[in-house]
Structures are given as C-alpha cells and as structure tokens.
Amino acid sequence: MRTVAMDWIALLGRILMSAIFFHGGYIKATTPTATMAYLAAQHLPLVGGAYALSLLVEIGGGLLFLVGYRARLTALALAAWCLATAWVAHYHPESREAMFHFLKNVCMAGGFLQVVAYGAGRISVDRG
C-alpha cells in the first residue's frame, strides 16, 4: 500500500542519492587536469574518454535519477557505475580509507537496485 509519505520519502531518497553524483561531477568538471591525472594513475586506457564518460554518468545520470526519468534503467546504470568505480578506484584492501569508499560504493549500488526493483515513486517523471 503506497502512501503520500512514501512518495515524498522516495523523492528525498533520490535527492540524497543524486547529491554525491552532482558533487563529484562538479569537481571533475572544474578540475579536468587533476581528474585526468587521477584517472591515468588508475591505469585507465583512453583517459579523455574515461573523463567524458564520468561527466556524462555523474552529471547526466544524476540528473535523470533525480527527476525520476526512466528511473529503473538509470538506477541500473548507476548501480553498475558504482560497482565499477568501487573496483577500479577503491579496492585496495591494505587501505582502511579506500575500503571504506569501496564499501560505500557497494552500498550505493544496493540502494540503486532497490529503485530498479520498486521504482522511483509517484513524485517522478515516471510516476511509478
């Protein structure tokens, strides 16, 4: 049984989950040289492409998720992104801080999978 409160809570959840993507995208957009140096240090091929993809996913995906447009598909893509970045950037078992961020990304992927399963709520472009 859906209630009005549940719809507002779903919206709040999307706002909170989108915030980290907007922040990360903003930092990457305003510090391209540092971001590309970090991506190169992670041994990623095609650093420029990885940079462009990260901006697209973080800003574009964050916006789509926030408004609830094609929310299940967007949430699935963001869950995959969280798992990929957890593995590529944060899986360093020798580092307590890195593993914290690894598990944070895994947790975020779990939250996105909840949206894949249950939708974005009625206060969304998808309305469901």
Image (cartoon, grey):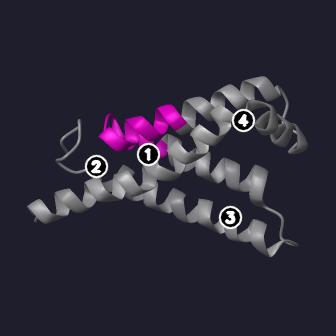
Tell me: 86 left or right of 69: right
Badge 4: how crowded within 10 Å, few (<14), some, or many (20+)? few
Q: Secondary structure at mark 1?
A: helix
**N-terminal-most mark, 1 or 2:** 1
**N-terminal-most mark, 2 or 4:** 4
Q: Secondary structure at mark 4?
A: loop
Q: Nearer the viewer, mark 1 or mark 3?
A: 3
**N-terminal-most mark, 1 or 3:** 1
Occupied quadrant, residue 74: top left
Q: Nearer the viewer, mark 3 or mark 4?
A: 4
Relative image position of residue 94 (x, y in whole percent)? 88, 72
Q: Quadrant of the N terminus?
A: bottom left
Taking the magenta stretch, the answer to whether it contains residue 100 is no
Occupied quadrant, residue 128: top left
In the image, residue 108 sits, relative to residue 69, either above or below, namely: below
> Given contact means CB atoms under 8 Å apart, are the residues at marks 1 and 2 in contact?
yes
Query: Which residue does the numbered mark 3 point to in the structure image?
Result: 101
Query: Which residue does the numbered mark 1 point to in the structure image?
Result: 75
> Given contact means CB atoms under 8 Å apart, are the residues at marks 2 and 4 in contact?
no
Residue at 83%, 70% (x, y): give it: 93
- The amino acid pointed to by label 2 is Ala
Relative image position of residue 71 (x, y in whole percent)? 35, 41
